[in-house]
Amino acid sequence: LEYIGIKLQLEEEIVESHTVLKSLKGKPVFLIAATLRPETIYGVTNCWIASNGIYGVYEVVYRKDDSADQSESEYFIMTPRAARNMAFQGFDGGEFGQPKEILQLKGEQLIGWSLKCPECAFEKIYILPMFNVSTQKGTGIVMSVPSDSPDDYRALLDLKEKAGLREKFHLKNEWVFPFEPVSVVDVPTFGDMSAKVACEKFHVRSQNDVEALKKAKDLVYLKGFYEGKLLKGPYAGELVQEAKAKIKSYLLSQNKAIVYCEPEFPVISRSG
Ligand code: ZZB
């Protein structure tokens, strides 16, 4: 399975104010959000993590001209599982197959950090918790597109509607309330907020309604891919089917994203 890993850059003030990360001052630190829908990047409102998941900060060495002293480092935040896979895909810590972990973090420690998301409508977005984020899939980091993803739509609404949930995770209002869904894809008969329409059709009442959410997601995926028309960016007016590859190439060529392949089998770590 091939994901596009969108590079969401951690804001400098977050890097500087963290006891360990401040040693990376001036260096690029990214959360890598795994997506199958890079064309929806214009509709990102926040970033989701699993609050009880384990994440790591990894040094990734880019080699220029194959010479070691021409190398430059970037820092990726993702699950240890994703880091292990990426280390075989050109994103290692200096040695093929070896991730270089700087620090481990619990998902809840990431909540409220601010990020810059390429091409999105907001100057900065925040890391928030969603129950349906799996640490066993992708990078464990998800870009949230509430206009087109039923999971994202419902989870964001839960945070807005449920004060108890915001208190539980110590969320500030300013991380949640300013972020309304942004329309990016127009789907015939569904309109430009297909996630909302699908959630209502299948009576999704919370992010815990996993079965109804799955039905909503399957329908929106299908409709969005085959019938959707893009509304934002340089490919506005084109079918999603056509625009998807162009946006992917653009993001890759600008170094705003990477390709991340997920093996179809479990990777066994050397430590067991
Ligand atoms: C942006 C986006 C916009 C997504 C959309 C979907 C939709 P799949 O098919 O189940 O593999 N995702 C990625 N990683 C995780 C994770 N670890 N845990 C939970 N969700 C994850 O789903 C791939 C999609 O699930 C990815 O694409 C990502 O959300 C999310 F409008 O990125 B997507 C109808 C779906 N629409």
Image (cartoon, rainbow, N blue to C red):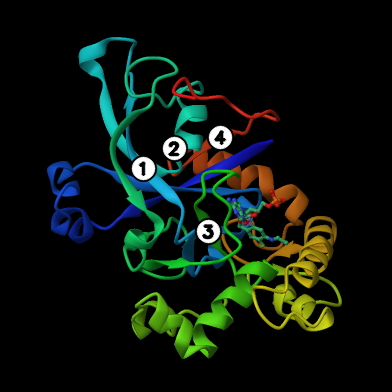
Looking at the image, is mark 1 or mark 2 earlier in the sequence? Answer: 1
The residue under label 4 is: 260
> Dividing the picture into quarters, in which one does residue 201 lie?
bottom right
Of marks 2 and 4, the one in the foreground: 2
The residue under label 1 is: 56
Q: CA distance from mark 1 to mark 2?
A: 6 Å
The residue at 33%/24% (across/down) is: 93
The amino acid type of the residue labelled 1 equals Gly
Q: Nearer the viewer, residue 183 or 88?
A: 88
The amino acid type of the residue labelled 3 equals Met
Q: Nearer the viewer, residue 197 or 156?
A: 156
The residue under label 3 is: 143
Of marks 2 and 3, the one in the foreground: 2
Q: CA distance from mark 3 to mark 1?
A: 18 Å
Apparent side of residue 39 relative to residue 114 in the rendered image (left or right) = right
The x, y position of residue 163, in whole percent, is 46, 89
The residue at 22%/59% (across/down) is: 14
Q: CA distance from mark 2 to mark 4?
A: 14 Å
Looking at the image, is mark 2 or mark 3 earlier in the sequence? Answer: 2
Q: Does label 1 point to a residue whose CB lies under 8 Å from ligand 1?
A: no
> Dividing the picture into quarters, in which one does residue 158 lie?
bottom right
- Which label belongs to residue 80? 2
The amino acid type of the residue labelled 2 equals Pro
Q: Residues within 10 Å of mark 3 (few under 14, many from 20)?
A: many
State if disc 2 and disc 1 touch (CB < 8 Å).
yes
Q: Secondary structure at mark 2?
A: helix
Q: Residues within 10 Å of mark 1 (few under 14, many from 20)?
A: many
